Image: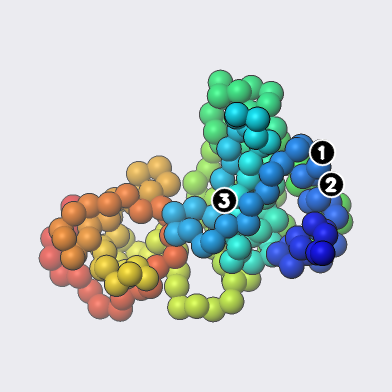
Amino acid sequence: MVNQVELLSRFLPPGSAEMVTALIMKLQIQLRISRKRSSKVGDYRPPRSGHLHRISLNHDLNPYAFLLTFLHEAAHLVVYEQYGRAVQPHGKEWKQAYASLLEPFFARYLFPADIETALKDFFNRRGESNRTDLELNTILRQYDPPNGTITVSELPDKALFRLADGRLFVKGMLLRKRYRCLCLNNRRHYLVSHLMEVYPVHYQYSLNFP
């Protein structure tokens, strides 16, 4: 039987599986490795009906993204235990918890220099910062195997993109962390996550688009 450390080592950077396993045990986390989800890469759910804290992570994340997403969601757990739902999801309390969880991994020099620099920039900025969040995700994607996709946030305004199911969209305005995009197949608008991986379509959309 494969033990937890050996299983997690398949998804994590070398030298980090033991540390993550220790955190899972300390924080009493039920970890689920999920299929690929286009709208999110991970999530946290508080305990209820006798369940443990639950964190799910997409199975196809590169090792650095897998580790950072786990720590991101674990920080939500720490904040929930301390404050419940009384604070902002990605406010200063969450940022402090995330930084504290990351510190032992920084001490082991587990991240490449470009990721470490982006993380330090993220933590040095006050409050929530969509820009540094996007910059970090852009750097993390450089460690993905090539698959012909980019995230919606990397596309220029009014660019065309295609989803895996074949639907065509035009990128619209940013509303927090989702873009209001027009589907050309049915002329309806949808809110699309800034992290959704899509296929760019390389010709200009010439009609007026709000």
- Residue lying at 57% horizontally and 51% vertically, measured from the top left: 42
Residue for badge 1: 26
Quadrant containing the N terminus is: bottom right
On the image, the x and y values in percent for residue 160 come to: 28, 69
The image's mark for residue 22 is 2
- Residue 106 can be seen, yes or no: no
The colour style of the image is rainbow
When asked about the image quadrant of residue 44, the answer is: top right
Q: Earlier in the sequence, mark 3 or mark 1?
A: 1
Q: Residues within 10 Å of mark 2 (few under 14, many from 20)?
A: few
* Residue displayed at 63% across by 57% down: 33
Q: Is residue 190 above or below residue 97?
A: below
What's under tag 2, amino acid-wise? Answer: Ala
* x and y, in percent, of residue 78 in the image: 70, 32
User: Which numbered marker is on residue 42?
Assistant: 3
Outermost residue to the left: 207
